[in-house]
Structure formats: structure tokens, C-alpha cells
Amino acid sequence: MKNLFFVTGFARSGTTLLATLLGRNADVCATPETCFFEHIYRRKGQPTLSSIENSRFYQDLNLSISSNLDFSSYRNLFVSGLKAFNQNNKKIIIEKSPHHLAFLPSIFHEFPNTKVIVIIRDPRDIFCSLRDVEWAHSSPLRHAAEWSARHSQLIKLESVYPDNIFITKYEDLIQEPHNELTRICKYLGLSFQQQMLESTSTTTVPEWEKSWKDKVKKPIDRTRIGRYREVLDERDVAIINSIAKEAIHFKYTIEIGKTSPITQFAALMLKSNAYRNLRLFIRRRRFYDNI
């Protein structure tokens, strides 16, 4: 699919905000989170209707039996579902799922020529934001380790897919939205439109997510930058600084301090592929057990 692009980034990094702003462009259809590559995707085999009926992909895109979904492959199912959601036949479809940050190799396998916009945010501010939502954990160690693992992989993929990955920073988007959106639009082959900065309705937030995402319909809030300085205690900041060292690559100023060997060992385990695969298995089981 020629004009299918992706927006992703660590949870609470501003993916919903970015996708919403882009979705206000007259040529763009921006989707809610589909979690397709996290919950549903397999490289082999054929999906079935019964295997996706309770998924966010099926429900949040408002798909139905009459949506003309193509079950011949997972790739075709994904594409046909997005096309069904794009009822106004917009020029570009942008899919947004934060957890797809961990599945970029699979995305590039299925869509070698696609473009992915990854939004980066200070990991300390992300932790502040995570603590504000009821579904998130409150462990700075786990947060820092998972952030480090995802962004370590991203740094490697940047060199492999230099033309397919575009990095934007939450802080730049918040402070200079016109300039940053102009850069992103140019990358996607679009023209910036002033209506992208106007507070209007959005297609990126389904009804059940509005309690923690409804801010995207309000004017951009610049006070969210550096909030960790007022909210987090020194211990939490020290843990995140010492584990999420990849933040330096993205030009965040951090002071790397010392942590105990036990903390370092725990972080190493939480960064491992074994832990990632276990988390993925648990999330998929929770999804399929509800079918």
C-alpha cells in the first residue's frame, strides 16, 4: 500500500497528539490505535474473523462483516481494515499504535517502503505522565528499562532504515508546532495546513479512551515539558537517569549516577528479549482469552 504510514513511540510520548494533528490535514486519515502487530500479526498463516472480533483493530476501527476484509494474509487483513476505516478516501492513511515501536522489523518486513514517524519524549516526563493514568505501573526501574530497550533498538534501526524512520521530539512539537509539523509534512509529501493546529474533533481517540486522551482536543499545553522536576523525587530521577542512557543520543541532558548491582541486574533482565517475549505472550493471552 503506497500511502500507508505509521506513527509510533513509547506510551505517553505524544503519539496521540501527533497523530491527531496530522489527522486534521485534509489529505490524511489518522486511525485510533489498532495494536495489530502486537496482538494479531503473524508472518505465516491466515487470520479468521473469530480471531479478531474482540480486538481493538476490529472494534475501534468500527469494522464489520460488511467491511470487505481480506483474510488471505495478515498483511491484507491489516490493509483492508484501514481502507474500510478510510471512508472518505483520504490520500494518506496514518496508523498510530505506541507499542508498534517494538515491532518495527515486522512492519518493515510487510511494508518495505513505508515511512514511520517516531516521537521521542524525555523518559522522566513520560514516567510522570504514566503515573497519572490508572492502567500504568509505578516502577521507575521497569519504566526506564523498557524505555531503554525500545530506544536502543530504535537507534540501531535508524542506521538500517535511514529513509524510512523520521524522529521528532515531543518537546519540539510542543514548543514549535508549526515548524515541526511543516518538517513532518514535507517528509510525508504533504503541505502544512493551518487547520492542523486548530482544536477540533479527532478520529484517533475512541470513546473508551477519552478519560486520559481527551486533552488532544484542547490547545497544546507547553507546561508538560520538564514536569518531572516538580513531581519526581530524587531517587526516581536517579534510577531513570542511570538506566535510560539512550536519552543522551536524543540530546536530553541527564546526569548518570551510580545504582546498586541489584538494580543494574534487574534492569538488565527487564531489557532482555526473554522479558519482552514474556510480556508479549501475557498481553496476547489476555487478548485471546477474552474471545
Image: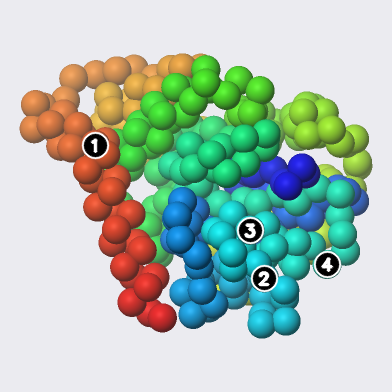
Tag nearer the camera, 2 or 4: 2
Q: Depth check: 226 or 12 in front?
A: 12
Percent of width and height locating residue 155: 46, 23
Q: Is residue 102 above or below residue 246?
A: below
User: Quadrant of the rendered structure where residue 73 is?
Assistant: bottom right
Element type at marker 4?
Answer: loop
Element type at marker 1?
Answer: loop
Residue 83 disc label: none
Under mark 3, the amino acid is: Asn
Under mark 1, the amino acid is: Ser
Tag nearer the camera, 3 or 4: 3
Cα–Cα span, label 2 and label 3: 8 Å
The reply, left or right, for residue 277 in relation to residue 226 is left
Crowding near pointer 2: few (<14 within 10 Å), some, many (20+)? some
Cα–Cα span, label 2 and label 4: 14 Å
Cα–Cα span, label 1 and label 4: 41 Å
For the residues bearing labels 2 and 4, Cβ distance under 8 angstroms: no
User: Quadrant of the rendered structure where residue 221 is?
Assistant: top right
Crowding near pointer 3: few (<14 within 10 Å), some, many (20+)? some
Cα–Cα span, label 1 and label 2: 36 Å
Q: Tell me if I can see residue 257 in this picture.
A: yes
Look at the image and name its color scheme: rainbow
Residue indicated by mark 4 = 87
Residue indicated by mark 2 = 69
N-terminal label among 2 and 4 = 2
Percent of width and height locating residue 42: 45, 55
The reply, left or right, for residue 93 in relation to residue 125 is right
Residue indicated by mark 3 = 76
Q: Tell me which residue sits at (33%, 77%) in the image.
A: 289
